[in-house]
Amino acid sequence: MTGAERLGAYHLIEALDADGPPDPRPGQFYMLAAAERWGGGADERPYLPRAFSHARAHEGRLSFLLEAIGPGTERLAELREGDGLHLVGPLGIGWRPPASGTRPVLVGGGIGAAPLVCLEDELRTAPADTGNIDRHIDGKRSPREAQGGYALLLGFRSEAHAEAASLFAAVPELATDDGSKGHRGLVTDLLRRELDQGTPATVYACGPPPMLEAVRALCAEQDVPAQLAMESGMACGYGACFGCVVPTKAGYVRLCVDGPVVDADLLESALFPGAGH
Amino acid sequence: MTVDLCGIPLAGPVLNGSGTFDAIAARRAFGDALLERFPFHAFVSKTITLAPRQGNPPPRLWETPAGLINSIGLPNKGLEGFLASDLPELAELPVPLIVSVMGFSRAELATLVQRVGERDEVAMIELNVSCPNVETGLVMGADPAETARAVEEVRALTGKPLIVKLTPNANDPAAVARAAEGAGADAVSLVNTLKGMALDPRTARPWLGGGTGGLSGPAVRAVALEQVASVARMVGIPVIGMGGIASGRHAADFMAAGATCVAVGTENFRDPAAGRRVASELVGLIGEPPPQTGRHRDPSGGHTPLVFTEGAGSSAPGRTRFA
């Protein structure tokens, strides 16, 4: 661990993965566990590691956004600089390039903002030869930049949660459940408004299952390609346990190896028993 | 530390439990370095059935105190899919291959054993008998006579060693083991998972999509150790012991209780390199006399830390690295 700080209602922890691959893809994830005292919390848990997409990755320095909601996240949120963090990763398949000629629209709900942070980093700074997402080079504007770059829409429960928006370079359009910051209501209200403007878009969404389902349904209705970073209870993260399956039009798929970013087209629904657990 | 398991030489005694490591997916995640530093001395496949199976509806997992309940439901490509697409990839592993099969009738089991047994890539066959026989309604592995009939049905169909995977959900696992031995089994492995269930705290209804599931992990280790000891006393064939093994010390305990080989199961989920770690820790322990009952204490207090590096320094932080 190289750092830990509060970010409003969340925790941002940072670790140095000195031997790790230099360039985990935005939307990939890591299995995390505290090196010491992993176990012995409420109900003698945690036992299994916990899956998190990195918010940022730079030269082996990884940051993760946490909300302390159970024995695993509570223990991870206790960690301080110098403590040991076990990690396995990067794992899974991250965000894919946008559909040709479309503007990326990033939609985050709560802690789901995390994997959009590094996606935004890539949209803004990575050289075009990483091949995935075109961007401006040497100050020149890519075709997408010229038509407005990307849109960033974030929804949170309250102003304290919305402090996570400070991780982004762009000033997002915000929605909060309680109206304490930005639009009072759902981030999908903002998405509908955005899509109604008619600019061809590729939607990148991460958030709680009801939000992802609303994004999926809206994008299906408007025939907009969407990628959803999903969550499902995982034991291993690397395809061993078959525990994290998501029902798709092609049957059950393991979210850890065939996701966690899933094409919305593949799903009948982003809501299923155990989703987001 | 070479081991002879039913005439098959192994470079060591550490296997994986069936269904706890997908070598094909792990190779995709970790690259060919996985093969150079393969975690096990023999590889046991996920159980295959005659017909393809989707597996149980989610949710499939529930974390318990020091353990895990799963209700996966044996998703697999079926016999033909396995032979066509998985077997060639598993044949590239640097260790002997044990294929786990389950039949819902003795005829199904016979087809599976015959077809798998005729493949040169397969060193041994494990019979997963923890399922109901659709003809009798009895769980094959819970009943000595059912188990004996299943083994007798397939014994003559292959010259390959047959391992019977015993369920702990039997009145007398040692009697089932003896019946398997009497019918011609070459080894027994135990324990499979213990039946368990969890309730959704919001609804008080079963959490798992399959209703009930199987408990594994450190939570079952003491039960498993006792069953391995009692089975090993009753049979002359090799015993493969498993159930919550997460360190070399645990493996040494199971071997002291009579196991010829051990298998790492749920710990693979926490640490993909757990098999190598258990094996290397075991090398440092195996020469020691068995620990005295009542005096032995796990130095980690039962909360075995996750360790992704090799070696016995089990509190050293690290990361999974097969390279």
Image (cartoon, rainbow, N blue to C red):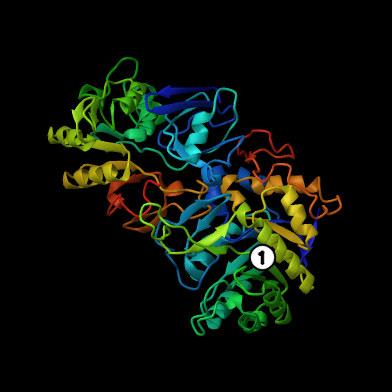
Q: Is residue B93 above or below residue A17?
A: below
To which quarter of the image does residue B96 belong?
bottom right
| Element carrying mark 1 | strand
Instruction: Look at the image and tell me whether residue B153 can be seen.
Output: yes
Q: Is residue A101 above or below residue B22?
A: above
Q: Position of residue A235 (x, y in %)?
A: 51, 49
To which quarter of the image does residue B95 belong?
bottom right
Instruction: Look at the image and tell me whether residue A199 can be seen.
Output: no
Looking at the image, which residue is at 57% across and 53% down? B23
Nearer the observer, B169 or B32: B169
Q: Is residue A183 above or below residue A95?
A: above
Q: Which residue is mark 1?
A: B190
Looking at the image, which residue is at 38% across and 60% down? B205
Amino acid type of disc 1?
Leu
Q: Position of residue B173 (x, y in %)?
A: 67, 72
Image quadrant in which the C terminus of chain B is located: top right
Q: Answer with left or right where residue B162 lies relative to residue B285.
A: left
Chain identity of mark 1:
B
